[in-house]
Image (cartoon, helix red, strand yellow):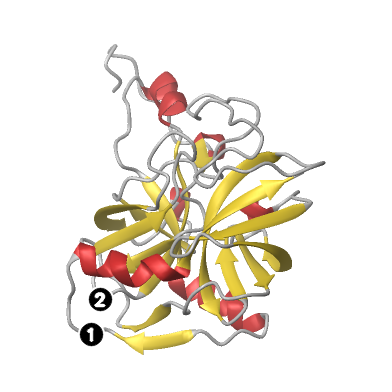
């Protein structure tokens, strides 16, 4: 039952899922205000083009980055800034999978070492995880942000088997960033959160920390189908969240979608 005593809605609709592409030129409910041209952690304008959104990506092989399909879709150019050195490079889309919401980018230049994917065992409910990325570009810290949480469920919205539900807080701009276990291995790719405003309008209650990530196994299959063989390792000894962040830092990049 809802707070008013009326029956609660029968289910959550797909439009209540809010991808996290970053700050867009048109302000939307639940999104930050528009950025100025070239706005974001690294600033800088681009003649003839403007930044319409931002996101996160990470290195999966030399010259290869992984992010979300919705981060790269419709961009005439992808600009990449490294978290460690701040170098700006241009990336091109090599492959996309709209169903999984994943995109593979090609890039020339040094962007950091590839992150290692977890080879086993499978993540469990309640297992600690870390996100690393660039949320709310132009409003929060100009550097990457780390959050912690747990794997809440082994499926996503409406039992989507390709995703995890996670409690680690994510914001617009986190999309495409790595979800790491407490050994520093990639177990997923941050993709979306529930739209709290729409859920509240429908149910009368505000959801808390209901976010989603594409499973690492889905990312591995996508990469291998496109000729990339990522680093994979079995679970090792635990690290602190700070140590996991230090592993992710040189390999995580800020992405700007230019049009």
Estimate how packed mark 1 is, as few (under 14), some (14 to 19) or many (20 or more) residues with alpha carbons within 10 Å.
few
Q: Quadrant of the N terminus?
A: top left
| Residue 59 in the image, given as x and y percentages of width and height | 52, 73
Q: Nearer the viewer, residue 173 or 217?
A: 173
Report x, y in % for residue 217.
Answer: 47, 75
What is the quadrant of residue 93 in the picture?
bottom right
- Residue 145 in the figure: left or right of residue 24: left
Corner quadrant of residue 224: bottom right
Q: Are marks 1 and 2 in contact (CB under 8 Å)?
A: yes
- The residue shown at (46%, 59%) is 177
Q: Is residue 161 above or below residue 44?
A: below
**Residue position for label 1:** 236
**How far apart in space, not on screen, are marks 1 and 2 (Cα)?**
6 Å
- Residue 41: image tag: none
Instruction: Say whether residue 243 is left or right of residue 104.
Output: left
Depth order, front residue of 186/34: 34
Q: Nearer the viewer, residue 67 or 96?
A: 67
> Circle 2 sits on which residue?
183
- Residue 10 in sight from this viewpoint: yes
Identify whether 224 is placed above or below 85: below
Residue 127 seen by the camera: no
* Disc 2 element: loop
């Amino acid at each position: 039952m809802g707070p008013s005593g009326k029956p609660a809605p029968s289910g959550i609709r797909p439009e209540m899922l809010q991808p996290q592409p970053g700050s867009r030129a048109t302000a939307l409910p639940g999104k930050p205000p528009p950025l100025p041209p070239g706005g974001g952690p690294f600033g800088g304008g681009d003649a003839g083009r403007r930044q319409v959104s931002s996101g996160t990506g990470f290195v999966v092989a030399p010259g290869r980055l992984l992010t979300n399909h919705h981060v790269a879709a419709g961009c005439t150019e992808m600009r990449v800034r490294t978290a460690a050195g701040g170098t700006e490079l241009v990336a091109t889309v090599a492959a996309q999978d709209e169903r999984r919401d994943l995109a593979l980018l090609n890039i020339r230049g040094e962007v950091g070492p590839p992150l290692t994917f977890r080879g086993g065992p499978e993540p469990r409910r309640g297992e600690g995880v870390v996100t690393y990325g660039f949320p709310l570009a132009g409003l929060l810290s100009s550097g990457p942000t780390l959050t912690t949480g747990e794997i809440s469920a082994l499926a996503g919205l409406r039992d989507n088997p390709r995703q995890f539900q996670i409690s680690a807080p994510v914001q617009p701009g986190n999309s495409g960033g790595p979800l790491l276990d407490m050994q520093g291995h990639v177990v997923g790719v941050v993709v979306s959160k529930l739209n709290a405003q729409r859920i509240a309008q429908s149910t009368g209650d505000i959801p808390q920390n209901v976010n989603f990530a594409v499973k690492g196994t889905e990312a591995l299959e996508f990469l291998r189908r496109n000729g990339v063989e990522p680093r994979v390792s079995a679970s090792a000894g635990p690290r602190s969240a700070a140590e996991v962040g230090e592993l992710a830092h040189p390999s995580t990049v800020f992405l700007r979608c230019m049009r």
